Image (cartoon, helix red, strand yellow):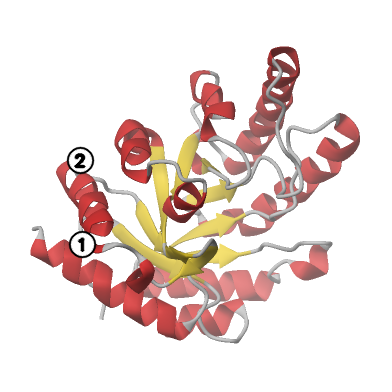
């Protein structure tokens, strides 16, 4: 049964070892939003078929669901054009194939895990310019820039892409686990940027291992994060970004319990 929370509680489309559609069918009565995990897309055959998309749309209408679409992990949207253009085409193909679902957000990594944005001022400025051009094209495909939620990554500081918020009306996806693994302060980052945040990825981290259940998150930290979400009347999506039934059930129970204790 879905909890009644002020935000939209979500999780991923890979909680059970099955394809997207069976996962959505089993999760539809427990959450408000499902992150469609499209981490690896090599060609059209890797995308959900039109039949699957139609069924996902019907499930959303029946259960009051929204979807967030996680774009592929290997995008290099701020790289030189030799690498940027194929990534841009891949991102746009995912957006086009899922646009009929009217996604709450498209979660985007500007750079794949093997790429590190430059720190030198001139190169950083060029990096930002290339990222801006990519996001402008993607925003046209998505229908609006605020549907694009740029996610903070483990391998570079958020301060490298935050200037984009002054150029475009893109949103943020705040991943708490990534901030913890970087030894950044997730509470300070959440407080500073919640107004531009469309999606929050919430999960535990242990010894650098990410996407674990919330039973691996410190009680005081989770309580403080929930307090910020409640006090700021956040109405976006909070995704329990885990990938197993056990982690989902323990995380669902814990976030609901913490929320109820504070409202």
The residue lying at 54 percent from left, 85 percent from top is: 22
| Marks 1 and 2, how far apart at CA | 14 Å
Q: In the rendered view, would you say 168 is above or below 37?
A: above
Q: Image check: 174 left or right of 81? A: left
Query: What kind of element bears circle 1?
Result: loop
The picture places residue 105, in percent across and down from the top left corner, at 49, 49
The picture places residue 71, in percent across and down from the top left corner, at 64, 54
Residue 4 seen in render: no
The picture places residue 61, in percent across and down from the top left corner, at 40, 69
Q: Image check: 160 left or right of 96? A: left
Q: What crowding class fits label 2: few (fewer than 14 Cα within 10 Å), some (14-19), or many (20 or more)?
A: few
Q: What crowding class fits label 1: few (fewer than 14 Cα within 10 Å), some (14-19), or many (20 or more)?
A: some
Q: Which residue is mark 1?
A: 5
The residue lying at 61 percent from left, 86 percent from top is: 18
Q: Image check: 162 left or right of 222? A: right
Q: In the rendered view, would you say 143 is above or below 2?
A: above
Q: Where the C terminus falls, by quadrant? A: bottom left
Q: Quadrant of residue 202?
A: bottom left
Q: Residue furthest front?
A: 207
Q: Which residue is mark 2?
A: 232
Q: Quadrant of residue 214?
A: bottom left
Residue 205 seen in render: yes
Along the line of sight, the residue nearer the viewer: 226 or 42: 226
Along the line of sight, the residue nearer the viewer: 220 or 244: 220
* Mark drawn on residue 98: none
Along the line of sight, the residue nearer the viewer: 207 or 113: 207
């Amino acid at each position: 049964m879905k909890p009644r929370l002020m935000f939209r509680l979500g999780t991923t489309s890979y909680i059970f070892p099955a394809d997207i559609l069976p996962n959505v069918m089993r999760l539809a009565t427990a959450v408000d939003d499902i992150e469609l995990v499209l981490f690896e897309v090599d060609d059209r055959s890797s995308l959900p078929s039109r039949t699957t998309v139609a069924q996902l749309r019907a499930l959303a209408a029946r259960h009051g669901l929204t979807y967030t679409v996680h774009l592929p992990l290997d995008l290099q949207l701020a790289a030189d054009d030799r690498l940027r253009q194929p990534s841009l085409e891949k991102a746009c193909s995912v957006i086009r194939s899922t646009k009929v679902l009217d996604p709450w957000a498209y979660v985007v990594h500007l750079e794949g895990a093997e790429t590190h944005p430059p720190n030198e001022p001139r190169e950083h400025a060029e990096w930002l310019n290339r990222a801006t051009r990519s996001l402008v094209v993607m925003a046209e495909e998505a229908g609006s820039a605020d549907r694009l939620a740029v996610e903070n990554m483990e391998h570079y500081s958020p301060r490298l892409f935050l200037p984009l918020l002054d150029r475009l009306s893109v949103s943020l996806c705040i991943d708490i686990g990534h901030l913890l693994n970087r030894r950044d302060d997730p509470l300070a980052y959440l407080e500073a940027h919640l107004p531009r945040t469309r999606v929050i990825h919430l999960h535990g981290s242990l010894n650098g291992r990410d996407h674990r259940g919330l039973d691996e998150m410190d009680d005081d930290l989770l309580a403080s994060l929930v307090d910020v979400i409640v006090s700021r009347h956040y109405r976006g999506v909070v995704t329990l970004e885990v990938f197993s039934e056990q982690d989902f059930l323990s995380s669902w129970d814990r976030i609901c319990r913490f929320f109820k204790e504070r409202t």
